[in-house]
Amino acid sequence: MRRNASKPPVVYIATSAGGHIELMVALRAAFEGYRRVWVVQPSLRAQVLMREGEEVVVLPEYDRHPLRGHHLVNIARAARIVLRRRPRIVVTSGAGATVPFCMLARLTGARVVFVETTARVAGPSSSGKVLSRLATRVLVQWAEVARFYPRATVCRPALLRSLGERRPGKGVFVGVGEHSQPFDRLLELVDRAAGDGLLPAPIVAQGGPSTYRPSNYELRDWLAPDEVARAIAAAEHVICHAGSGLISSALRAGRRPLVLARRAAHGEHYDDHQLQIVEKLAALGLIVPLRDAITAADLEASRAPLRAPASWELEPDVADAVRAELEAVLGPAPDRSEAVAGASQALASNSTSRRIA
């Protein structure tokens, strides 16, 4: 029976803020032709999606304590969405705010595809420990983390999908991302380097909820995603936290970013997983890791042309793996050719043998 082209099948994209939603945005090509419903936490990126015409359902803020009010409100809202809409497939990157929605969707018969974020290299995320058990398909982006997910398929990281050609730029972009905890340590590091005359002007900086106020450059709390993209493309240097969204944007712009990992001991994150991605990407020659200061040698290293890692073509692309799952459940999207659909179905079949036992 032919599908009504005016009513494309629906995929639900469940994700929290920060690097989680940036991963799903990076995979947006995998969702082409399907009706997309984004189930998200409040964030600047979610607002941008709505302005772009995407269908967005906002979950209430999430409290990590299971008995506090926000947690219960989140569950109630998730239950209403699931019972009214009855999703057939949910693609999720976590984190905690999306777990109740995914669990309830799975209980009502939906397939759940869990994609672990690029930031997780040497260990699983807290939400991944839960979502990987209920998911019908688990996709990870580094071989090292696959041993924590016995049913996982290793995919080429979305962060490495494209490395741009370095073009001339001026000044510096500084970003701490949309994470809810401050990152004063990075802003102070930049302030010292600017005061020492190491950093070229202009300096465009986004500080989020940080309380540090620099003496040697101006700071804005928030920048819209399109402002961030333009600032990165225009800058000679990018200095940022180890968030996969900002790092990926820098790499696409041909910039090797200078990256400082958030640390739990300083109240900058819930754990130290950013150390994992800094170590991995530094070993691949894609970033310049920062520690206690920004040096002239760091800036010089950031100017070197990017080179694709020798092994990055060895795994299936994570977007292709997601697309194959959608087509297996929903059928080919109305605007996709039979040839493309057939290729994705072949990938779905072949990738079964690639799962880590």
Image (cartoon, rainbow, N blue to C red):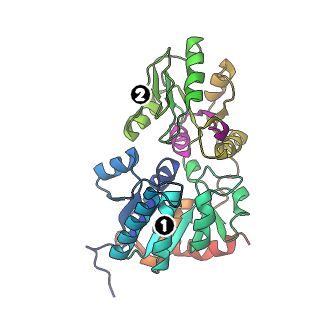
- Residue type at mark 1? Pro
Quarter placement of the C terminus: bottom right
Element type at mark 1: helix
Give 343 or 291, whichever is nearer the viewer: 291
Q: Is residue 39 magenta?
A: no
- Residue type at mark 2? Arg
Residue located 36% across and 76% down the image = 83
Check the image and report above or below for 279 versus 313: above
Q: Position of residue 235 (x, y in %)?
A: 48, 27
Closer to the eye: label 1 or 2: 1
Mark 1 / mark 2, whichever is N-terminal? 1
Query: Of all residues shown, which one is farthest toward the left?
Result: 6
- Write down the residue under mark 1: 100
Q: Residues within 10 Å of mark 1 (few under 14, many from 20)?
A: some
Residue located 47% across and 34% down the image = 209
Cβ atoms at labels 1 and 2 below 8 Å apart:
no
Q: Residues within 10 Å of mark 2 (few under 14, many from 20)?
A: few
Q: Position of residue 98 (x, y in %)?
A: 48, 61
Residue located 56% across and 42% down the image = 243
Check the image and report above or below for 307 versus 117: above
Quarter placement of the N terminus: bottom left
Q: Position of residue 167 (x, y in %)?
A: 50, 30
Q: Is residue 331 visible?
A: no
Stretch of the chain drawn in magenta: 244-265
Label ID, residue 220: 2
Query: Of all residues shown, which one is farthest toward the top?
Result: 196
Q: Quarter of the image holding residue 134?
A: bottom right
